[in-house]
Amino acid sequence: MAEYLKNNLLGMDRAGLEAYFERLGEKPFRARQIMKWIYQQGETDFSRMTDLSVRLRELLQETAEVRAPEVLSDHLSRDGTRKWLMRMGSGNAIETVFIPEEGRGTLCISSQVGCALDCQFCATAEQGFNRNLTTAEIIGQVWHVNRLLGRDEKNAKRLTNVVLMGMGEPLANFRNVLPAVNLMLDDMAFGLSKRRVTLSTSGVVSNLYRFAEQSEAALAVSLHAPFDELRDEIVPINRKWPLAELMTACRYYIEKHPGRHITWEYVMLDGVNDGDQHARAMARLLAGIPSKINLIPFNPYPGARYRRSSDARIQRFREILQAKGYNVITRKTRGDDIDAACGQLAGQVKDRSRRQERRAAAREGIAS
Ligand code: SAH
């Protein structure tokens, strides 16, 4: 059978694999066996999966494959952060970043080629949107890096955390993201703790309800402004789902996950959203929700129209929130020498959507 017709097993979570093996006339426990081979051993060759019957191994070799995205380049930052560019076909590529820290290793993965949400301070938005990643392409990032780190002596830190904070809006691709998250948490696959797999959203409220109901993973929300007027401007999805609706959905997540918290991300933009009044309004907005606040100093990129708030301003903002009882950290900028910091991921996005083209043209003063 031709290569392109093969079923990529990386695209199926446990339920999907069980259904797949059932169609082949096999017992559902084959799913667990094969998951261990693929995710824990990093094995791609069915002939080496020795606890499967010879007949099944042959059948899989003819009809199935384990195919992760191809790595185009690998960059290591001075601070140990590592970034890979992965090929997504048609001249497109996405970025995946590994951040080693004391006692943990966090992988930041992408969920789309580009992004359609147009947040005004984000390099990925500048690239426009091309397409959703498949489940295989999403989990393939984790699969690949886990396999690579296991072998690489110099970077022997293990992968313990995954954040969906790379390129794209995960809740705009929920259908493909959910099985990938299931695999991260599944003991037969990566077996990561549900508190160590975090989906970050700028507020696709319709799918936030589905996420709250269908996943155990942790939630981070990109707030960036406590007032609708400002948020409409810098996080345009707010025009569709304003703060009141976003907050109702967030409270629903907490209701469904007692004892858990929400991480609030807040990019610090000089003179835009970093005033005392913003901090105070944010404290009121989050009242009653178990919260952790991450202040992210703005990371610049070519063509960016904002500046990073001063350290003193960030400190003051933080103190206002802390005085109201919030747990606040200022996120350290990591990997900025290799353009791997938050909001700097650009990848290669070809054939971006027309809407984005028009915006870019308008910005450059070309009539659209
Ligand atoms: N679309 C998702 C996940 C990707 S962005 C979301 O919006 O949450 C991950 C985080 O980096 C978000 O909080 C995003 O707002 C932030 N970010 C984007 N551009 C940034 C920049 N230039 N500097 C600092 N943080 C940025």
Image: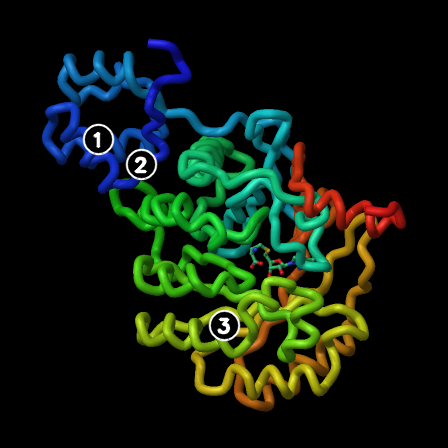
Location of mark 1 (residue): 20
The answer to whether marks 3 and 1 mark residues whose Cβ atoms lie closer than 8 Å is no
The reply to whether residue 78 is in sight is no
Q: Which mark is residue 12?
A: 2
Q: From what the image shows, is residue 212 above or below residue 60?
A: below
Q: Please state the horizontal and vertical placement of residue 265, each as a whole percent of the image.
A: 58, 67
The answer to whether marks 3 and 2 mark residues whose Cβ atoms lie closer than 8 Å is no
Location of mark 3 (residue): 246
Q: Please state the horizontal and vertical placement of residue 37, each as a whole percent of the image.
A: 28, 29
Foreground residue among 338 and 87 = 87
Which is more N-terminal, label 1 or label 3? 1
The answer to whether marks 1 and 2 mark residues whose Cβ atoms lie closer than 8 Å is yes
Position of 45 with respect to 19 (left or right) is right
Q: Please state the horizontal and vertical placement of residue 270, each as a whole percent of the image.
A: 80, 71
Which is more N-terminal, label 2 or label 1? 2
Quarter assignment of residue 285: bottom right
Q: CA distance from mark 3 to mark 1?
A: 37 Å
Q: From what the image shows, is residue 246 above or below residue 287?
A: above
Instruction: Estimate how packed mark 1 is, as few (under 14), some (14 to 19) or many (20 or more) residues with alpha carbons within 10 Å.
Output: some
Residue drawn at x 89%, y 50% as measured from the top left: 365
Quarter assignment of residue 269: bottom right
Foreground residue among 51 and 8 = 8
Q: Nearer the viewer, mark 3 or mark 2?
A: 3
Residue at the farthest right position: 365
| Ligand 1 occupies quarter | bottom right
Q: Nearer the viewer, mark 3 or mark 1?
A: 3
Amino acid type shown at disc 1 = Tyr
Amino acid type shown at disc 2 = Met
Residue drawn at x 77%, y 73% as measured from the top left: 272
Amino acid type shown at disc 3 = Leu
